[in-house]
Image (tube, rainbow, N blue to C red):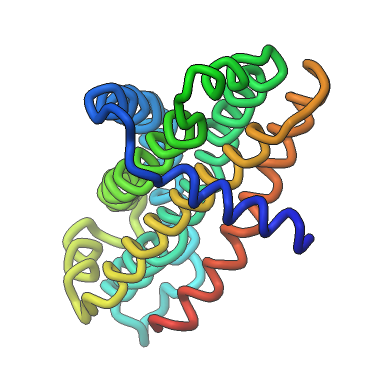
Amino acid sequence: MIQSLGRYILLLRLSFRKPEKFSVYWAEVMREMVSAGIGSLGIIMIISVFIGAAVTIQTAFQLISPLIPKSVVGGIARDSTILEFSPTISALVLAGRIGSSMASQIGTMRVTEQIDALEIMGVNAPGYLISPKVISGVTMFPLLVIVSVLLGFTGGYIACLTSSEVTTFDFISGLSDGFNPIIVTTCLVKSVVFGFIITTICSYQGFYVSGGALEVGQAATRGVVYSCVMILMFDLIISRLFL
């Protein structure tokens, strides 16, 4: 475990060395941003709408009472969506979609000796392959989470339209009542940390793979599993620090 942690830290150090040619790295960063951001937008939209609707329906089912204002449903759905559902569930989904792709891509380059060829040509392979992925992760993941939060609210609004327990007016009132900005800060910090975790762990697993196609698949699986475990652990840590 200590050896793996040391190799992980050294790989990050190599990844963020000064690039040889900035224009090449910039083009790679833009390509990774499109792949990670635009490519993941569809699945994030679908998941967010349904989760927002489900959270609103379940909250209304548990809290509707003559003694409790109906606007409370909107407030609880807002806090749950911003603090937990949008950043954490989106990160777990993106770990499977983006993380496995990164680990497989880098792992395939390793077993086909393309990384060795880059190093022979004097190219900083970790910097060229990993740093654009990390930069795209820490920049695009927060944007995806913001979209997820907004669509979660939309899903809750649609759920109120189709049910009689909570009106849309009460739901919207609950979204604004008692709002604490710290929940938005916590959400954004989580999204940045989760993006860094997914991209670095999966890239590490792919970069140090050895063998053939079977080992590439195993490395991708390990990258996703380790990323999900670390996401849940840092979800708890960040929540404890900020809340």
Q: Position of residue 77 (x, y in %)?
A: 37, 64
Residue 151 appearing in the image: no
In the figure, residue 213 lies in which quadrant?
A: top right
Q: Residue at 46% across / 51% down in the picture?
A: 196
Image quadrant containing the C terminus: bottom left
In the figure, residue 6 lies in which quadrant?
A: bottom right
Horizontal side of residue 147 vs 2, given as left or right: left
Is 215 above or below relative to 61? above
Q: Residue at 32% across / 65% down in the picture?
A: 78
Residue 138 appearing in the image: yes
In the figure, residue 72 lies in which quadrant?
A: bottom left
Q: Position of residue 92 (x, y in %)?
A: 56, 47
Q: Residue at 58% across / 52% down in the picture?
A: 10
Q: Residue at 21% across / 81% down in the picture?
A: 178
Q: Position of residue 194 (x, y in %)?
A: 47, 54
Is 9 above or below relative to 112? below
Horizontal side of residue 216 vs 25, given as left or right: right
